Structures are given as structure tokens and as C-alpha cells.
Amino acid sequence: MIALAVLLSVQMADAQTKTPEAAKKAVESAKVAAANPKKAAKVATWTKLATSYMDAYNAPAGNAWLGANKQELQIIMGNQKPTSVENVVLSGEQLVKEVYADKEFYFSPAGQLVMINVTAPVYEDALGLALEAYKKAGEVDVKNSKTKDIKAGIENIARKYVDEGMNWYTLGDLAKASQLFEKAALASATEPLATVDTTALYNAGFTAWAVKDYARAQKFFEQCLAANYYYEGGEVFAKLGDVYTNLGDAKKGAETLEKGFVMFPQSQSILIGLINYYITSGENTDRLFVLIDEAKKNEPNNASLYYVEGNIYKELKNIEKAVESYYKCAEINPEYEFGYIGAGILYYDLAIELQEKASNEFDDKKYNALVEEFEQALKNALDPFEKAYAISKDNELKVNIAEYLKNIYYRFSSNGPEYEAGYKKYDEVVKTRQAN
């Protein structure tokens, strides 16, 4: 779920949830009232119809709520028993699925309810029907006496659509999730609420992009930019640039990425998109350095810009220039550890690449030469990683750096006491973190 913009919400049981039969009866009664011309002129008639549809929407789930454990659910569900129980994996997580006549419950390994999927709703799209009723209530409420209540009702519908979208995202039907996120955005835009739900728009775009429905994704990402919503350091620019490229307009894709780069020069997604464009298009990659130089002029003391420059050189396979840029970070800001980390990872990745080549080499002379290069690359990683470890004040980051150092020193632990001591030092750091 990390890929989606997640709205933090707590779902609790609705008080005194009606049975599906009672909920349907209440809706039919409210529909009769709404069909009466005299009653249809009253706001209460339409809010009653809206809440009746919402009761019908909630009815199959009963009083179950996310976070409840099985013992709590047994108490409130009485004699309801699942027709089947099975272990499933959703979004990489092991869950227990209980199937009922009208719903599915998904439990975490700890026995907590983490998702409810209604399979037999009382009404198809009860949320949409409730929304139409609230819209009508807003039209009838000429004195705006119930605007607050109507807005609250529409907000609740929008949240329910988001929850549904999250469910289908987790279940793996991203196309359906996209439709539901769109409905959430449309609900929020409905009068009298009339707000732009940029999170729902981004999620609708992301899920459409993920299933390669690029025309649909374009619509939502463009709406995000129009609302000045960029998500996670410019991710909207990165996704929209990719969308334009896949729709056959690589030039517009590059222009979008460049706009994003000006605002978010540290975005790795935007940077990779630009690098891929300039490499595949055959255009001069010097344009990338023009962009980074412009960013440096605006922020000459921003060490992270040199880190970005190092990443560009790394992607272009210019190791010497990449390391030079990474080390420049420390000159700009002696407390900025990421330049050293970038250099260390560059050498470490290079070593892994050389090791892979050596493993596939059958000529002894070439094999030995590759092993020598591999070992030198690993040794080259020691200095930047050591410097990064020394200046970093982030304990979690220090442990991650220690993982690299531990692995390198272990490789050379038989070459001398200094390597053995290095291995023991960083192995202890890693073990301490694991123990905690």
C-alpha cells in the first residue's frame, strides 16, 4: 500500500446497525416519501433517504469493525458462522479469510480484522444512491439550514469509496480500485461539499497507471497538478511524464519531468525518467547538467544537489565524475552523510556487478582479473562508508551503513587484523540493532 497516498482513518462500527432486511425496508419506505411531491420539498425527506441507503450499505458488515479481534466479533455476531476459512496472501501479507453468505472477513496473523469485503450488498452502489439523495437535499435546502449535516453525509460517502478502493487495491483489482477512487473524488466535489480530494485523484491516477490505462491516468494526474498537488516530492510529475511517453508524446513527457525537476531536484523518480529520456531519445544528456546547474544557482549551499549530480553521473556510468560529485557534498556541508553513502553504494554495486561477471567467466586469466577488480571496488567502498558512519547522527542509518561495512570487512577478514577488527566492530553494531 505504500505506493498509494493513504488517508489516515479509523473505522468503527456504526451504532445499532440494521439487518439487511430491515435496512431494505427502511429504504423502500423512504423512497415512497421522496416520491410524494409534498414531502419531496422537505430537506428531511432526502436526508432520510440518504441515511437509509447508508444503513443499507453498512448492513451486511453488521457491527463488525476494523481492528476487532475474533472473540469480540463472536460476541456481536451471535450465531453467524463462516462457510469456509482459508489462508491467503494479499499485498505480500499472510491473512486468514473467513467467508460468509454476504461478506468476507480478512484477519491478520494476530487475529485482528483488517479488511471487510461485502459480496452481497443490499443495493448495488448504495453509496451512489445515497450521494444522489444528499445532492437533492442540498438543492431543496434553499435556506442552507442543513448544509453542515449534508456536507458531513457526503464526506462519509467519500470516505467509504476510499475504503472500497483500498480493499480492491489490496485484493489486486487495480482497475476497479481506480474507479472507486474516482468516485471518492467526485463525491467530494459534489455540492454543497465541493472540495478537491487530491489524495483520491492521485490514487485513481496511480492505479490506472499501474494497469497501463494511460489515458485515464493522464486525466487524474493533470487534475492533481492543476490543484498544486505533487505527492511525495514530485511523484505526480514522474508518473505524468511516464504517461505522456507511453501515450506517444515523449517530448511532452520530458517537458513535464523537467518542470518537476526544477521544483523537486532530489526526486529519484523524476531524475531516472529524465535520464532514460535523454539516453533513449539520443538527445544530448548535457541538458541534465544544465538543469542541475540551474538548481545550484538557486541553492548554492544545498549539498543534496551534488548528490543528485552524482546520481546522474552514476546512471551515465561515469564513475569518476560520480564520486567527485558525491565527495563534493561534504565540502558544501560536512554533516551531510548522503554523499559518502552514494559513493560507497556506487563502489559496492560495482563490486557486485564484477562478481557476477567473474562467476560467468571460464577463462582463468580473465576470471582472476575480474576478481581483482571486484576486491578493489569493495575496498574503495570502505573509505566513503566509514566517513558516512562517522558523521551520521541517525542511528538507524548508521546501522544500515554498518551492514555494508560488516560485509566488506568480512570479505577481507583473513587479510589482516585491521579487517578482522572492522568486521567485529560492525557486526556488533548490527547484532545490537537486531537484539533491540
Image (cartoon, rainbow, N blue to C red):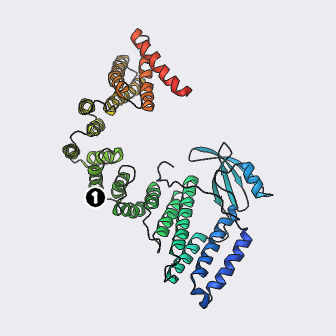
For residue 125, say whether it is visible: no
Where does the C terminus fall, quadrant-wise? top right
Q: Is residue 289 left or right of residue 220?
A: left
370 or 5, which is in the foreground? 5
Q: Give, as a three-letter code, the residue at label 1.
A: Lys
324 or 20, which is in the foreground? 20
For residue 187, say whether it is visible: yes
Q: Is residue 356 above or below residue 24?
A: above
Q: Which residue sits furthest right?
A: 79
Q: Residues within 10 Å of mark 1 (few under 14, many from 20)?
A: some
The image shows a total of numbered marks equal to 1
Rendered location of residue 385, percent (x, y): 36, 25
Q: Is residue 34 left or right of residue 317?
A: right
Rendered location of residue 307, percent (x, y): 29, 37
Where disc 1 sits, the SS reads helix
Rendered location of residue 365, percent (x, y): 34, 16
| Residue drawn at point x = 33 percent, y = 58 percent | 244
When asked about the image quadrant of residue 412, the answer is top left
| Residue drawn at point x = 29 percent, y = 35 percent | 314
Q: Which residue sits furthest bottom?
A: 38
When asked about the image quadrant of residue 350, the answer is top left
Rendered location of residue 360, percent (x, y): 42, 26
Query: Label 1 belongs to which residue?
Result: 252
